[in-house]
Image: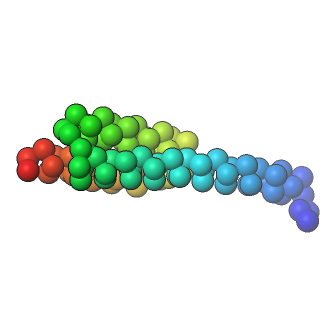
Amino acid sequence: MANTKSAAKRARQAPVRTARNQAIKTGLKSRIKAFRSAVATGTPEEIEAKGKAVVSAFDKAAKKGAIHQNKADRNKAAVGRAATAKAKA
């Protein structure tokens, strides 16, 4: 049981925020999986479309605080490298 009003409020907020962050991360993982599938078997147009969707999802997740901005930047760079490597191959 919380001892202060602020602690009680934090206890109410935590499950809501946890659920929101989990939903954002799950959607992000789904987009990454779709992108990797497109890189493995898709057309260049499909890879570009899925890549843009993943980059956008990373930006939104970082903006909402579900993931750290550095993690978003790191993963966006990896998406770009994968797409470029596939285009050159």
Which residue sits furthest left?
Answer: 88
Q: Is residue 89 left or right of residue 52?
A: left
Q: Work out whether residue 69 can be spotted.
A: no
Report the number of discs.
0
Specify how the rendered protein is coloured. rainbow
Q: Is residue 55 left or right of residue 42?
A: right
Q: Residue at left 91%, top 65%?
A: 1
Across and down, in percent, residue 27 comes to 51, 47
Across and down, in percent, residue 76 comes to 32, 48
Camera-nearest residue between 1 and 55 = 55
Q: Residue at left 42%, top 46%?
A: 31
Camera-nearest residue between 5 and 12 = 12
Q: Quadrant of residue 49?
A: top left
Q: Is residue 63 left or right of residue 22?
A: left
Q: Is residue 3 left or right of residue 78?
A: right
Which residue sits furthest front?
Answer: 41
Q: Residue at left 67%, top 54%?
A: 18
Q: Residue at left 37%, top 48%?
A: 34
Camera-nearest residue between 79 and 73 = 79
Across and down, in percent, residue 58 comes to 42, 45
Across and down, in percent, residue 81 comes to 20, 51
Q: Work out whether residue 29 can be spotted.
A: yes
